[in-house]
Amino acid sequence: MKNNHHKRFSLPEFLEEIQNYNQIIGIAEIARRYFAMNAFDGVLTTIGVLAGNYLAGVRDLSIPIQTGIATSIAMGISGLWGAYLTETAERRRELSELEKISLIDQSDTSIGRASRFAVIVVSFVDGFAPALAALIVLVPLFLGPMIANPLLSYALAGGIALVGLFGLGIFLGIVSEEKNLFGYGIKTLLAGLLAIAINFLLGAH
């Protein structure tokens, strides 16, 4: 008769275990940072896609939609893969150093399990955030047949991108417990306005 060594958790126990992992590693803080940083990248990259197609005179919205989707998929895969490899290497290094100090194999300890869980969560957030941000910005283009004006679709998508950047700035301000949330929002909004301005300046020549 074989013993079942796999512990089964009920939902409350599972949530408690996740909370324990978060206390050990600080997963929520890391995930918030990755989410904001990569959503920011996703919005700015999509602004580039929109500006490039608009300045090239593309009025068939299926083209920027296809380009935007392809770009969001590439960013998602890049984020997920890069975060997985980076976080795995970082967590293994930390566990290895801890094992040298404690002279105990940490693989099956709470710290070891928390490290593996952190890699999964951070990788998912890193891949999901830029792809989701890009697709949200593209919504007015998906609604192109209903809007019936390609230029208005471009303008609405650009507006969503700028509002999204401002919102991310507010989010970062809340995370860092800044008093001047509006100032944080303006800082991230300026990045989007700068990207648009440079694209239009280059397109004018």
Image (cartoon, rainbow, N blue to C red):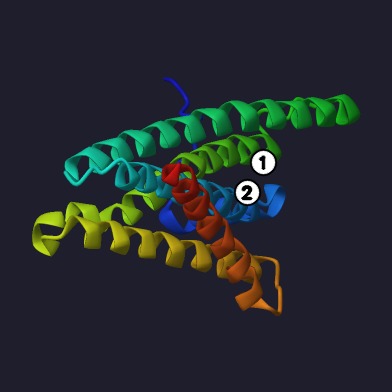
Task: Identify which residue, 128 or 71, lies in the foreground.
Answer: 71
Which-is-in-front pick, marks 2 and 1? Answer: 2
Image quadrant occupied by the C terminus: top left
Task: Name the residue rendered at 57%, 56% in the picture.
Answer: 191
Image location (x, y in percent) of residue 190: 58, 62
- Identify the disc placed on residue 110: 1
Taking depth in this image into account, of 136 and 113 the one nearest to the observer is 136
Crowding near the residue tagged with mark 1, few <14, some 14–19, many ≥20 C-alpha atoms within 10 Å: some
User: Which residue occupies the extreme front position in the image?
Assistant: 205
| Mark 2: secondary structure | helix
Q: Can the viewer see residue 9 in this picture?
A: no
Residue occupied by mark 2: 21
Secondary element at image label 1: helix
Residue 107 in sight here: yes
Query: Please, is residue 181 above or below residue 135 in the view?
Result: below
The tally of labels here is 2
* Circles 2, 1 touching at the beta carbon (< 8 Å): yes
Where in the figure is residue 158, as x and y percent of width and height? 37, 59
* Residue lying at the far top of the rendered structure: 1
| Quadrant in which the N terminus appears | top left
**Relative side of 111 to 129, left or right:** right
Q: Earlier in the sequence, mark 2 or mark 1?
A: 2
Name the amino acid, label 1: Ser
Residue 14, placed above or below residue 113? below
Res. 181 image quadrant? bottom right
* Above or below for 187 versus 198: below
**At x 40% / y 46%, what residue is drawn?**
46
Residue 98 location in percent, x, y? 83, 32
Other residues around mark 2 within 10 Å, as few (<14) / some (14–19) / many (≥20):
many
Tag of residue 200: none
Residue kind at label 2, given as amino acid type: Tyr
Residue lying at the far right of the rendered structure: 101
